[in-house]
Amino acid sequence: MSKLDLKSRLSELEFQVTQNAHTEPPFSGKFFNFFEVGTYKCICCDSVLFDSQDKFKSSTGWASFHSSINDKALKLVEDHSFGMLRIEVVCSNCQAHLGHVFNDGPKPSFKRYCINSASLNFKKNG
């Protein structure tokens, strides 16, 4: 899907987050404090990225997961923006920016995938 197609289909925030690596304001995303059972998909290409059983309350202001749905769903990229080293999380299928991953999460992975709600859609189980 082209950037022009995405620009016409996504909200301004969704486009800026997924295509220009912006970050939504903390505590504002629709999935920040959302805990229904289902799967989270990339808003751009509909690839399945996260399962609700891997989501946890991190109180950081963004949706947080300790694992992805599978090892191939996400691509991790070094991010040197803002004068620091972070690990950016992108959709492996379409390269949409999702957020960042940190090593301060819970067991079993000790990872915290800090994900912008604006980059996700949710499909409820059932």
Image: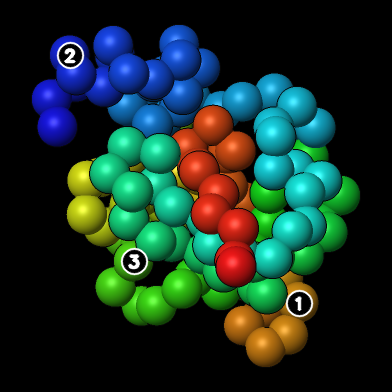
Structural crowding at the residue carrying mark 3, measured as other residues with C-alpha within 10 Å and reported as few (<14), some (14–19) or many (≥20): some
How many marks do you count on the picture?
A: 3
Q: Point out the frontmost of discs 3 and 1.
A: 3
Q: Is residue 78 visible?
A: no
Give whichever of 67, 85 is nearer the camera: 67
Spatial CA distance of label 2 from label 3 is 24 Å
The residue indicated by pointer 1 is 106
* Front-most of residues 63 and 84: 63
**SS at mark 2 in the image:** helix
Q: Where the C terminus falls, by quadrant?
A: bottom right
Ranked by sequence position, the earlier of labels 1 and 2 is 2
Q: Residue at x 36, y 78 (%)?
A: 71
Position of residue 11 measured from the top left corner of the image (x, y, whole percent)? 46, 15
Q: Position of residue 97 (x, y in %)?
A: 38, 39
> Measured from the top left, where is residue 109 in percent x and y?
62, 83
* Mark 2 Cα-neighbour bin, 10 Å: few <14, some 14–19, many ≥20: few
Mark nearer the viewer, 1 or 2: 2
Q: Position of residue 3 (x, y in %)?
A: 19, 20
Which residue is labeled 3 in the image? 73
Q: Is residue 34 visible to us here?
A: yes
- Above/below status of 49 relative to 26: below
Label placed on residue 57? none
Name the amino acid type tagged 2: Leu
Question: Mark 3 vs mark 1: which is more N-terminal?
Answer: 3
Q: Residue furthest front?
A: 126
Q: Which mark is residue 4?
A: 2
Write the residue at 80% across / 32% down: 27
Compared to 1, does 41 lie above or below?
Answer: below
Taking the spot 29% from the left edge, 73% from the top edge, the residue there is 72
| Residue count near mark 1 (Cα–Cα under 10 Å), binned few <14, some 14–19, many ≥20 | some
The Cα–Cα distance between marks 3 and 1, rounded to whole angstroms, is 20 Å
Report which quarter residue 9 is drawn in: top left
